[in-house]
Image (cartoon, rainbow, N blue to C red):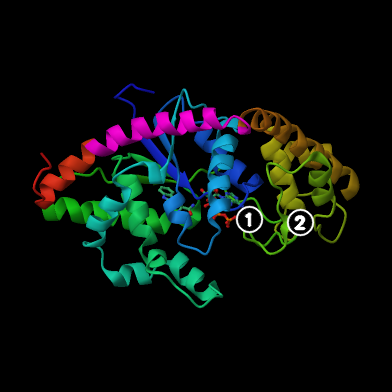
Amino acid sequence: MSNTDHKVILTCAQPSGQLHLGNYFGALLNWASMIDDYECFFGIVDQHAITAPYVPAELRQATYRNLALYIASGLDPEKCHLFCQSHIVGHTELAWILGCLCPIGQLERMTQYKDKTQRQDSGFIGSGLLNYPVLMAADILIYNADRVPVGEDQKQHVELCRDLAIKFNNTYSETFKVPEVYIPKTGARVRSLQDPNRKMSKSDANQSGCVYLLDPPNIVRKKIRSAVTDSGSAVRFAQDKPGVSNLLSIMSASTGKSIEDLENEFAGSQYGTFKDAVADAVITVLEPIQAKYEEIQKDKAYLDRIFREGAGAAQKRANKIMSKVYRKVGFVPRT
Ligand code: ATP
Ligand code: LTN
């Protein structure tokens, strides 16, 4: 991990809500597969999480819970840097500087901003929501990351980050690497069990469509048994069978078996038999994660130590970039 030749990977997730199977197959598993080959920084971005209405005590709880779940899901803190965004001095400072280079129009055109402002039911839209992608650009550039693994939905934000890196470099001289976006192919989109046309999402009003990593086995089985299936009875991956196809994808991701092998295995089976097998497979994936989570979540001192160590490594790298940035923009050095 300390090998300086290694390319730097940076990615983050907000500590909002509970982590679910979509987060696991679409993000955590892919992140874990990189820790042996890259120097990885994984951030829990609490400063991003306050751009939407929230409850402070729940944010604090979710920040610890996500850290414990990251570790339980395979992000070994001996092999990667796990940090909490607000522990690092520099993210918001760099966001300010980048914000001064960022046209407001570009922020107003961001898909996520448009979606969220349409959905915000309190009628209040804070400027943090508009500036969110600038803070995200700072999260990435402050570590001079080479590569940023994200879901498809975040691609536009990484593109803005690239634009800002280029703009800074052109305005002040070469400083930032222009990071590449990386969208993993596997597990890219786990869909809701209740509405397979939508992604599995913690913000979904219908929670029975979402399997949480901490759901006990009986709840997992209940949710999977009541997953919507399609007309007909064949267990087949097809466009006109989004429900069954989603279950096949989940089972394939859980077992490592190909979709084709699974179709053969369940040819002639009833949906009920197939769903039970999917539930078994998911429960088998979740069991060791939950066991590890139970073991570490009680140990606050351990979690605090991981955050402290992660912040140490992250701050060291951030300081290097920030002193360069401050010099380039013309700030007088602190003596
Ligand atoms: P939600 O819509 O559930 O609130 P999110 O996209 O805001 O989810 P984050 O916690 O910000 O969730 O996402 C963490 C990572 O998990 C991101 O890289 C995101 O692309 C990925 N992810 C979230 N939901 C899914 C899903 N259903 N399938 C695959 N990947 C997903
Ligand atoms: N916006 C992202 C979370 C996020 C992020 C980042 C991802 C914040 N900063 C930096 C990658 C790099 C999300 O909502 N999933």
Q: Say above or below: 203 vs 116.
A: above
Badge 1 or badge 2: first in the primary sequence? 1
| Crowd around label 2: few <14 · some 14–19 · many ≥20 (10 Å) | some
- Amino acid identity at mark 2: Ser
Q: Say above or below: 239 vs 257.
A: below
Identify the image quadrant of residue 85: top left
Q: Which mark is residue 273?
A: none
Q: Is mark 2 within 8 Å of ligand 1?
A: no
Q: Say above or below: 56 vs 177.
A: below
Residue 254 visible to an observer of this rendering: yes
Q: Residue 49 location, x and y as percent?
A: 48, 55
Query: Residue at label 1?
Result: 202
Q: Is residue 275 magenta?
A: no
Q: Residue 52 location, x and y as percent?
A: 50, 63
* Boundaries of the magenta span: 297-319
Q: Which mark is residue 208?
A: 2
Secondary structure type for disc 1: loop
What is the chief secondary structure element of the magenta stretch? Answer: helix
